[in-house]
Image (cartoon, helix red, strand yellow):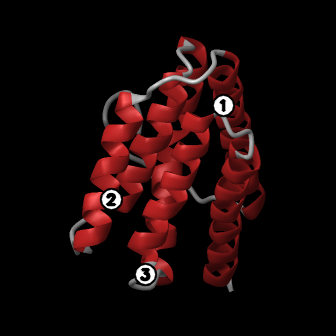
Amino acid sequence: THPNGRREVVEFTPRQIKNLYDVRWLLENRALELLFENGPSVYPELAQILGEIERKSNAEAKDTDFCDLDIAFHRALVRAADNLFLTNAWAGSAQMHYSMMKFNVLTDYGPRYAREFFEKHYNLYEMLLSGNKAAFPELRRHIMEAKEIAVSVMKTIKH
């Protein structure tokens, strides 16, 4: 989106997609580091979004924008680190991540997607609350899985 509000469709290459998700991992990993450095805490914004994800996944609402919920969850995760520059850097790529996820979801997520979506985010949240450092590989797996889906979708569309 340009400053004047005009939107432009930009083609992504598989390499650019990989780079985008690698940057996302770096930013969110740093957010987790900061959260663990500050010790156990309560994250009300994350809990609120997680509650909404759970309600939507249980209802299997047809009009639910899980991409928007995913962005909201990860934005809240980064914001909880309380680092303005980290938050701004993450926000700078959020629209691209949203676009990638929308594209991925259109391809072929089965009906169990909503429940799996909740469980992945719930597990990450629980690890964070309990101070379980397994949150780091879990977050990495979560983001890298999305990266692989995006790259594979891009390759199937190009051919």
Could you classify mark 1 by the number of other residues whose Cα lies within 10 Å: few (under 14), some (14-19), or many (20 or more)? many
158 in relation to 47, above or below: below
Q: Residue at x 68, y 64 (%)?
A: 145
Tell whether label 2 touches label 1 (CB within 8 Å): no
66 in relation to 96, above or below: below
Of the pair 137 and 130, the residue shown nearer to us: 130
Q: Quadrant of residue 110?
A: bottom left
Residue 118 in view of the camera: yes
Kindly identify which residue carries mark 3.
112
Q: Quadrant of residue 13?
A: bottom right
- x and y, in percent, of residue 56 in the image: 26, 63
Of the pair 100 and 136, the residue shown nearer to us: 136
- x and y, in percent, of residue 58 in the image: 28, 70
Tally the numbered discs.
3
Local SS, label 1: helix
Of the pair 124 and 132, the residue shown nearer to us: 132
Local SS, label 3: loop
108 in relation to 2, above or below: below
Tag 2: amino acid: Glu
Q: Residue at x 53, y 50 (%)?
A: 97
- x and y, in percent, of residue 71 in the image: 44, 46
Distance from disc 2 to disc 3, alpha carbons, whole Å, reads: 13 Å
Q: Residue at x 66, y 41 (%)?
A: 24
Tag 1: amino acid: Leu
Q: Which mark is residue 54?
A: 2
Q: Tell which tag, 2 or 3, sits nearer the viewer.
A: 2
Kindly identify which residue carries mark 1.
32
**Sequence-wise, which precedes: disc 1 or disc 2?**
1
Of the pair 147 and 74, the residue shown nearer to us: 74
Distance from disc 1 to disc 2, alpha carbons, whole Å, reads: 22 Å
**Sequence-wise, which precedes: disc 2 or disc 3?**
2
**Sequence-wise, which precedes: disc 1 or disc 3?**
1
